[in-house]
Amino acid sequence: MSELKALLFDVDGTLADTEKEGHRVAFNRAFADAGLDWDWTPELYGRLLAVTGGKERIRYYLSDFKREFTLPANLDEFVRGLHAAKTEHYTRMLAEGAIPLRPGVRRLLAEARDAGLRMAVVTTTTPANVEALLTHAIEPDAMDWFDVIAAGDIVPAKKPASDIYVWAMNKMNLTPADCIALEDSRNGILSSFGAGVKTIITTNDYTHDDDFSGAVIVLDQMGEPDRPFSVLAGDAGGATYLDLNLVRRLHSA
Ligand code: XBP
Ligand code: MG
């Protein structure tokens, strides 16, 4: 097994709990701006998360939940417009500090950076959203912490396809054996594990019942020294929070 060289981080649900009080709310604000009475409740949004990508999710809503809606002549433009407005709302919310990082994320990022490990973001979300989260929730130059930001429409096939992981590793000139991924969802692990990358899962409210077959460990959170994680599957070897030591052990196991 090769030595661990890079950590590949998913964003939504992994670095921060962005979906329920972030993306969902931003979608609803964009719908209201456009004069639409669509209301994506927390429960409905959980079902819509089956499809990754905001534009793709709007189309999924129209095709599977809102069939009675009369589609506009130019559907592509309509969806693009709604999604651009949603991105405006979402990035503004992040700039206002509405969404903090999940427990342990800042600590692990800092530890990996200090240890000289390479890091990348591998996500389906829009690049502007990644920048807003990193710069506001971590620090103004946090984009520089990452070698590669693989995000949004860079690859046409979003997660659960593996294309975004393959793209990121190619860019970094790394093989799957050099890396470990951190994900929160079934679609995420299908993408990372499908690319051959060992994957650590931290679950959240929307994903705790997902099938995480193939994960090296499933935790409820990364945890902190004074805030232990719960191990939902796998073996943490007595550790109580996710630090680089445990990441390396999981990578070489
Ligand atoms: C994240 C997503 C994204 C966000 C919305 O999945 O599915 O679509 O919900 O972002 P993952 P955009 O955590 O697996 O990357 O609206 O910018 O697409
Ligand atoms: Mg995710």
Image (cartoon, rainbow, N blue to C red):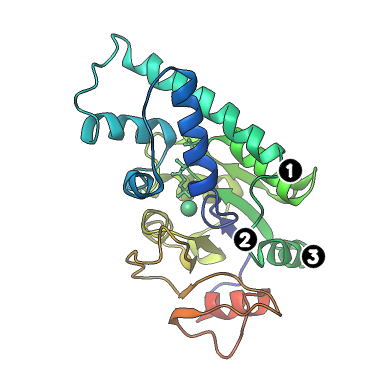
Residue at (70% x, 63% y) in the render: 117
Q: Residues within 10 Å of mark 2 (few under 14, many from 20)?
A: some
**Furthest-left residue in this view:** 68
Q: Is residue 78 visible?
A: yes
The type of residue carrying mark 3 is Asp
For marks 2 and 3, the one nearer the N-term is 2
Nearer the observer, disc 2 or disc 3? 2
Determine if the C-beta at disc 2 is less than 8 A from ligand 2.
no
Q: Is residue 72 above or below residue 188?
A: above
3D distance between C-alphas at marks 2 and 3: 20 Å
Badge 3 is on which residue? 114
- Label 2: which residue? 102
Tag 3 secondary structure: helix
In-front residue for pair 148/223:
223
Residue at image mark 1: 135
Residue at the bottom extreme of this rendering: 238
